[in-house]
Image (cartoon, rainbow, N blue to C red):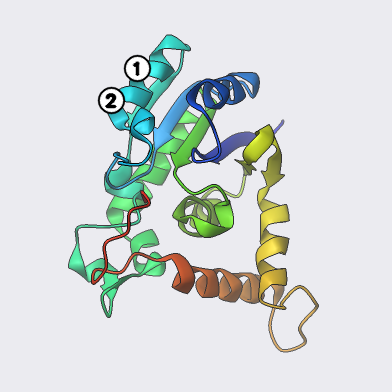
Amino acid sequence: MSLCKLYTIGYTPFAVAEFMTTLKDLGITVLVDVRSVPHSARYPEFDASSIKLHAHEHGLVYLHMGGGLGARPNDPALYTSGVADFKKIAASDGFERACQRIRNGLERYTICLMCAEQDPADCHRAILIAHYFRKLYPDVEISHILAGARVESQQELDYRILSKYGMDQYSFDSTEVQDLDNAYRKREKKIAYTLATEREVDA
């Protein structure tokens, strides 16, 4: 039996028409918006109301699930020293319920998680959601849609992130899983939302 497939995409490198064509060509039927606030001053065509309309016109279902899967949680307990803590978020009931909803949906639909960042290595859709989702549901194959409709597997992204921190060689004092978790935590420190600053990029 083949694995279920879950995709992610960042909208910034795409015009709306190309964005929708890319999703349709990959057989995606549900677009899940994982931004905490589904609004963009720089890309108004990707505001929730606009992208929902475009999705409907192309036969896709649009859902906003930023409450459970967003990078800017409302609960102060999910922050450490004012910075969103992905490990705490991933252990929260809201995140786990949202992931379970996605997993259940994969039995019937082909789902793509949408956020803003072009590179998944710079976005919580990969560093938070995909990384922890696969721990919950290892039977799901995760892929990331890049500019030009190129698709990168989660394993290819793992290697890129490990390489970024010089951790792509075998380590005798830690396991491969530990190395990967450490690399993702390092990446998290670069991208996690900080309460003290407001970022223009959606998350």
- Residue denoted by label 2: 49
Helix, strand or loop status at disc 2: helix
Question: Disc 1 residue type?
Answer: Leu
Seen in the image, is 79 located left or right of residue 202? left
For this view, does 195 lie left or right of residue 148?
A: left
Observer-nearest of 108 and 157: 157
Residue at 51 percent across and 73 percent down: it is 185
Pick whichever, 47 or 169, lies toward us. Answer: 47
Horizontal side of 131 relative to 67 (left or right) equals right
Q: Relative to 123, is 183 above or below? A: below
Considering every residue shown, the one lying at the far right of the view is: 169
Q: Where in the figure is residue 129, as x and y percent of width and height?
A: 47, 52
Q: Which mark is residue 53?
A: 1
Q: Are marks 1 and 2 in contact (CB under 8 Å)?
A: yes
Label 1: few (<14), some (14–19) or many (≥20) C-alpha neighbours in 10 Å: some
Query: Which corner quadrant of the image does residue 101 belong to?
Result: top left
From the viewer's perspective, is 94 left or right of 7?
A: left
- Identify the residue at horizontal 29%, vertical 57% (top origin): 72
Give the x, y percent position of residue 106. Answer: 51, 30
Give the residue type at disc 2: Ser
Q: Position of residue 127 (x, y in %)?
A: 51, 59
Q: Quadrant of the image for the N terminus?
A: top right
Q: Residue at x 27, y 71 (%)?
A: 79
**Vertical order, 117 against 26 (above or below):** below
